[in-house]
């Protein structure tokens, strides 16, 4: 160049750098500006710090949105589980739902019969749905079942015991064996 700085839209270039992914070298080439000139403007304007702060704000906003979305999903699942539990409870009290079963007589006629005990299929279907919702909520919250917690604690105890065993072996190997030398009849050789 001839010593004169070319006129450039530095605000637009700065915005492109702060919000974009290009390096300063790539941006200088793209804008048709000498890298040294762009680098000087970037240093004077604190572009790298602005880029870092912009990215931090962007990540924070994205995490906030994702968190809100997950909270809505979780609330929806919880409402569904509550409704399902209410339906199961209501169905247990309603003979038309849980106690109804379809039978066929000797002549091939189909009849709905209200029995004394809940119809197994109806009860199993509602219980399975409730269990599926409960599992979905556990997975979303990363909650352990009692069996999973017991298994994890058992594994942690095994690991702790193994660590103590290895430590004891290592200490035993570090401790030098005591060597004792006794010489019988040493008096005869002393003066």
Image: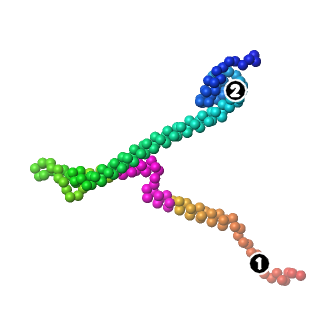
Q: Is 134 placed left or right of 30 in the picture?
A: left
Image coordinates for residue 49, horizontal then vertical, percent = 66, 34
The quadrant in which residue 9 appears is top right
Q: Is 11 placed left or right of 121 in the picture?
A: right
Q: Nearer the viewer, residue 42 or 178?
A: 42
User: In the rendered view of the protein, which quadrant contains the C terminus?
Assistant: bottom right
Is residue 39 among the parts visible in the rendering?
Answer: no
User: In the rendered view of the protein, which quadrant contains the N terminus?
Assistant: top right
| Residue at image coords 78%, 79% | 183
Compared with residue 11, is residue 122 higher up or lower down, i.e. above or below?
A: below
| Residue at image coords 69%, 25% | 38
* Residue at numbered disc 1: 182
> Of label 2 and label 1, which has the lower sequence position?
2
Is residue 183 among the parts visible in the rendering?
Answer: yes
Q: Which residues are magenta?
A: 128-154
| Residue at image coords 49%, 38% | 65
**Residue, far right:** 191
Q: How is the image coloured?
A: rainbow
* Residue at numbered disc 2: 41
Q: Say what secondary structure mark 2 lies in.
A: helix
- Is the residue under label 1 in contact with that under label 2 (CB below 8 Å)? no
């Amino acid at each position: 160049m001839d010593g004169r700085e070319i006129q450039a839209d530095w605000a637009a270039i700065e915005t492109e750098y702060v919000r974009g992914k290009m390096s300063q070298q790539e941006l200088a080439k793209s804008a048709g500006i000498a890298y040294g000139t762009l680098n000087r403007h970037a240093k004077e304007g604190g572009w790298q710090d602005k880029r870092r702060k912009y990215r931090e704000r962007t990540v924070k906003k994205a995490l906030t949105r994702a968190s809100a979305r997950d909270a809505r999903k979780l609330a929806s699942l919880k409402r569904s589980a509550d409704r399902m539990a209410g339906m199961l409870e209501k169905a247990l009290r309603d003979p038309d739902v849980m106690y109804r079963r379809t039978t066929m007589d000797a002549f091939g006629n189909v009849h709905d019969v209200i029995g004394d005990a809940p119809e197994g299929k109806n009860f199993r279907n509602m219980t399975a749905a409730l269990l599926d919702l409960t599992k979905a909520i556990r997975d979303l919250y990363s909650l352990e079942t009692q069996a999973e917690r017991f298994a994890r604690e058992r594994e942690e105890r095994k690991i702790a015991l193994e660590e103590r065993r290895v430590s004891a072996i290592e200490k035993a190997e570090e401790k030098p064996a005591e060597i004792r030398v006794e010489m019988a009849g040493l008096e005869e050789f002393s003066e």
